[in-house]
Image (spheres, rainbow, N blue to C red):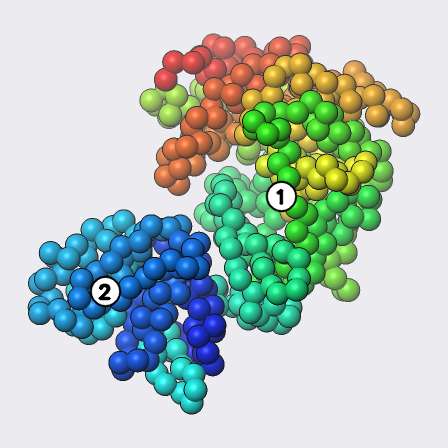
Amino acid sequence: MASAAIERFLPDEAATGRLGEDLALALRPGDVLALSGDLGAGKSALARALVRANAGAPDLEVPSPTFTLVQTYDGRVPVAHFDLYRLGSPSELDELGLDEALAEGVVVIEWPDRAGGRLPATAISIVLSHEGDGRRAVMSGAGPAFDRVARSLAIRDFLGTAGSGEARRVPFPGDASARAYETIHAENQPPRVLMNSPRLVLGPPVKDAKPYAVIAHTAQTVAAFVAMARALRERGVAAPEVLASDLDRGFLLLEHLGSGNFLDAEGRPAAERYAAAGALLATLHGQPWPERLEVAPGVVHDVPPFDRDALMIEVELLLDWYVPWKTGSPANASLRTAFADAWNAVFDRLDRTERGIVLRDYHSPNIVWRPEREGFDRLGILDFQDAMIGASAYDVASLAMDARVTVPEEIERSTVAAYVAARHAAGGFDEEKFREAYAITAAQRNTKILGIFVRLDRRDGKPAYLRHLPRIRAYLSRALVHPALAPVAELYARHGLLSEDE
């Protein structure tokens, strides 16, 4: 594995602080930063800046561990700060808890040469030296940790080209996707949002020699977000304005739509907000939607279809992840065949429904409530880069059966009623076909989510998602009552897939 190097000139302490912030945002448990340089070169200053940024506490007391040899700090990830200048022997690292620190969080080491070869080969070397009135930092390494550091530094360069090179970067809490977001605070400017979305890694073929993401039409670059944001804004939807972009690297600087929670003060669904969101969907569905959108001059995004293959590969996540978790055994060939037959019969009915834009994740985490605004401008809409052309009812089901919060049946009904009323008012609306499509897409979506939430636990080590399973099963049971879903309802009941016992 070839080593790479990145250099940065740090003209003052503020620049050193920004480098510490950039490093802190890139690090994960198990990463090691080895800080070298003469006395006074800035090793402790850089370590202090990193610890403070990681803790989100600019005034945190961070003493040099010259005499204690190690200090530990909580934050986004645990950080252990070692100073080995007075270390008598590398064997003393066992007593200092180096292995435990590596297992639990990030390790920052000054005077790493005293470790005697005890540091992992993936350690990132940072050599600091005096240069004029400032200092120079040379960072080198190889592997995922160094790649993350390089990407974080590239984000700082991107912000510089957008006129915000000295901004403070604050990470959003993580979600289930590979994208990351930060709030960008620059002097004399409103807060903005940085989207860090590297090109999608497609993964191995899973069906018909195609990766899952290709079959499911998952967006591969930020170009999809840029195109959709523009199209939504042109249609009167409060989507973020794209203020700066690097399409190749996957960086976007976005308008900050606010921080108002779509849920009420107690974290519960508010009927009037859900109704407003349903009415917004009705307005969106009443407008023509092209399948080719402009990203930039000469660059276009083709909105993919939410076709049979995409619908099926998503529901099969239930077989791949939920069924083994639920039953203790992989789904056998007989179940897979019956499953495909049942869902294909249902999807035959979906082929006859109204088609339009499907934003895919139109629910509470991705809607900002802005009570100071009027009309539809009260709803700031996020996370639409995976939009497709498919059954319009899908987003109504995504909203009214919100995956992240329990929506009582009465609020589900009032949300759907608000949508239906708005569609009738516009004319030319077939409610019966919509109701059928609503049930089918709700069942499809919640079947997929059962698989995804178990996958997040089993594959990605995120067990917190399992707490949502009872809600998703309840939603699925609601949807399966519709006669159009009889083949799926019978199959699920026969195999006990929605029973509460685990």
Describe the element under mark 2 as helix, strand or loop. loop
Whether 347 is drawn above or below 45: the answer is above
Tell me the kind of residue under disc 2: Pro
Rendered residue at 78%/48% (across/down): 233
Instruction: Name the residue that disc number 1 marks.
Output: 259
Left or right of 259, for residue 11: left
Work out which quarter of the rendered image holds the C terminus and state it: top left
Tell me the kind of residue under disc 1: Ser
Eye-nearest disc, 1 or 2:
2
Mark 1 nearby-residue class (10 Å; few <14, some 14–19, many ≥20): few
Query: Which image quarter: residue 288?
Result: top right
Residue 352 x/y as whole percent: 76, 25
Mark 2 nearby-residue class (10 Å; few <14, some 14–19, many ≥20): some
Rendered residue at 59%/40% (across/down): 216
Residue 385 x/y as whole percent: 65, 47
Residue 131 x/y as whole percent: 40, 87
Whether 70 is drawn above or below 217: the answer is below
Left or right of 499, for residue 268: right
Asked if one can make out residue 223 in the rendered structure from this viewpoint, the answer is no
* Cα–Cα span, label 1 and label 2: 39 Å
Residue 68 x/y as whole percent: 18, 62
Query: Which image quarter: residue 143?
Result: bottom left
Rendered residue at 64%/68% (across/down): 162
Left or right of 83, for residue 162: right
Choose between 251 and 374: the one closer to the eye. 374
Whether 321 is drawn above or below 493: the answer is below
Instruction: Name the residue that disc number 2 marks.
Output: 65
Lower position in the chain sequence, tag 1 or tag 2 = 2
Describe the element under mark 1 as helix, strand or loop. loop
Choose between 58 and 272: the one closer to the eye. 58
